[in-house]
């Protein structure tokens, strides 16, 4: 039983590391793909988008956005999907503490402790940045941009 749980846990961890591609999203959402035009199906399979596509087509081609914004322009409903990534940056962090308090009662009665500690250490921080945006007007792609 323990071995089965270990293998199941390992399988789930590996499955979560599998990258999401247009093909895997199409397999997971066959109805969304079936509703697309032949032209849009071909573009989605290549991971590309074009004007006039629906949000479902963009999702299949590029995946879910990192953030989305809704609005209005010239009386039309608008939505913007932003896609983000991040890059690592090494930073130096200072940390320190001074502590003084009371411990519990022990073998020799009530005791106090004192602690002072500080240091400087490197850390890795991840800085987000926008890699693509898609603008929808009335639920159709109106414009898009992608970093080179």
Image (cartoon, helix red, strand yellow):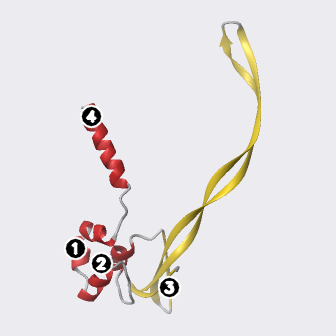
Q: CA distance from mark 2 to mark 1?
A: 15 Å
Considering the numbered disc 2 on the image, is that residue within a helix, a strand or a loop?
A: helix
Mark 2 vs 1, N-terminal side:
1
Circle count: 4
Q: How would you rate the neighbour count of disc 1 (Cα within 10 Å): few for under 14, some for 14-19, many for 20 or more?
A: few
Please state which of the two labelled residues, at mark 1 or mark 4, is closer to the viewer: 4
Check if mark 3's residue and mark 1's residue have beta carbons within 8 Å: no
Q: CA distance from mark 1 to mark 4?
A: 37 Å
In the picture, which quadrant includes the N terminus?
top left
Mark 3 vs 2, N-terminal side:
2
Please state which of the two labelled residues, at mark 3 or mark 4, is closer to the viewer: 4
Q: Nearer the viewer, residue 78 or 64?
A: 64
Check if mark 3's residue and mark 4's residue have beta carbons within 8 Å: no
Judging by the rendered image, the residue that carries numbered circle 2 is 45
Judging by the rendered image, the residue that carries numbered circle 1 is 31
Residue found farthest to the top:
108
Q: CA distance from mark 3 to mark 4?
A: 56 Å
Q: In x, y percent, where is residue 96?
A: 76, 40
Seen at 25% across and 37% down, the residue is 4
Mark 3 vs 4, N-terminal side:
4
Mark carried by residue 3: 4
């Amino acid at each position: 039983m323990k071995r089965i749980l270990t293998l199941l846990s390992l399988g789930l961890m590996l499955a979560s590391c599998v990258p999401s591609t247009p093909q895997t999203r199409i397999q997971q959402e066959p109805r969304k793909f079936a509703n697309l035009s032949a032209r849009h199906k071909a573009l989605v399979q290549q991971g590309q988008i074009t004007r006039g596509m629906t949000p479902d087509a963009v999702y299949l081609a590029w995946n879910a956005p990192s953030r989305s914004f809704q609005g209005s322009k010239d009386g039309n409903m608008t939505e913007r999907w932003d896609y983000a990534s991040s890059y690592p940056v090494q930073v130096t962090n200072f940390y320190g503490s001074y502590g003084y308090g009371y411990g519990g009662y022990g073998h020799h009665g009530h005791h106090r402790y004192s602690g002072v500690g500080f240091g400087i250490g490197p850390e890795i921080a991840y800085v987000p940045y926008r890699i693509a945006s898609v603008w929808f007007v009335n639920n159709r792609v109106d414009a898009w941009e992608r970093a080179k």
